[in-house]
Image (spheres, helix red, strand yellow):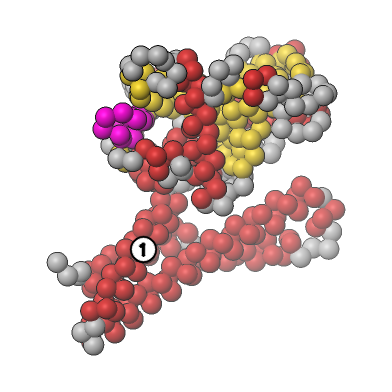
Amino acid sequence: MATDFPAELSALRATFTQIEAVSDPEALAARIADLEEQAAAPDLWDNQENAQKVTSALSGANAERERLTTMRSRIDDLEVLVELGTEGEDEETLAEADADLAKLKADLSAMEVRTLMSGEWDERGAVVTIRSGAGGDDATDFAEMLLRMYLRWAERHDYPTKVMDTSYAEGAGIKSATFEVDAPYAYGTLSVEAGTHRLARISPFGSADKRQTSFAAVEVIPIMEEAQEVEVPETDIRIDVFRSSGPGGQSVNTTDSAVRITHLPTGIVVSMQDEKSQIQNRAAAMRVLQTRLLLLKKEEEAAVKKELAGTITASWGDQMRSYFLYGQQLVKDLRTGYEVGNPAIVFDGELDGFIDAGIRWRKQQEREQD
């Protein structure tokens, strides 16, 4: 069936108009002008932390404006290409237009998903923690597979990452790992990955060819440079220092620079060993602890509101995605129904379909609760 280009172009323009309205080009231009003025100040770099925030914000705002401008131009160019192909009855040109249309629809869908992220901290970077669950060596191996999957996803998008802490298992894989994705909207994007992930496969660690089910938990919190909203008394924490270690417990640092902070009232534990000094690791660990406590406080407040409203069912299930590496070979999200029949590409970082579906699902849940 021939492509109905007039209808497709009309739909593209309607979607782009909605995206542009949410982005508010006039407000964006005013923000860029303000940031440019701040960036041009002669004393900008007297405060390096503030200077980095200003330049980063300016870069992000300019990138957003460029995305809008480029998308509008691509739609205009497609319209011209369709006109040329139609008037000249040129099948080759129309085939090229059809290919461009498919790319445009995919890129526009990605832009549309960005507009659905309007949470309090969605614009921030993300700190992701992966923990192995039930399943022995298969679970720790699964946790390491998930770590590689998310790092490969970030690499595909040219997002800078930093592994902040890794606890290696005595056998295969890792007990836990924490890494940072310092990119705009990383938290809003990756927060839909939070939850329990399940792996079902024929275990490579057992002697019998039996199916093994294992679990890993993914936690996602926003990067918060200063979590001043939560005060943590010194009497509420225990700080332990130790040497950083590699696989199998091998020491990779000859000084006690790694830091573990335990929040005694809640039992929350945060470890950091990426930085070179104990002071840096302690500061980084404290920032993450304060953020987790802040989020915990928000969750408790939200839970009270839900209970008062008569809603006690959590909106996110314990098991949110299953990975089947035997028989049917499938990865399926249990919330959205989105699935991919090639687990290899998913574990290699091909996650955008799952993430986009998750963001749309989350927004729909929010609308239904309003």
Q: Pick the quarter of the image with the N terminus.
A: bottom left
Residue interval drawn in magenta:
321-334
Provide residue 12's location: percent of width, then percent of height.
32, 65
Q: Does residue 349 lie above or below 167 as drawn?
A: below
Q: Residue furthest bottom?
A: 88
Which residue: 62% across, 47% down? 160
* SS assignment at label 1: helix
Give the residue displayed 57% in from the left and 39% down from the top. Answer: 126
Residue at position x 53%, y 21% in the image? 172
Front residue of this view, candidates 58 and 366:
58
At x 68% / y 25%, what residue is drawn?
246
Residue 128's spot in the image, x, y percent?
Answer: 56, 33
What residue sits right under mark 1 in the picture?
Answer: 103
Q: Is residue 315 visible?
A: no
Going by the numbered disc 1, the residue's amino acid type is Lys
Left or right: 96 as drawn, with respect to 34: left
Asked if residue 312 lies left or right of residue 1, the reply is right
**Image check: 253 left or right of 303?**
right
**In front: 273, or 109?**
273
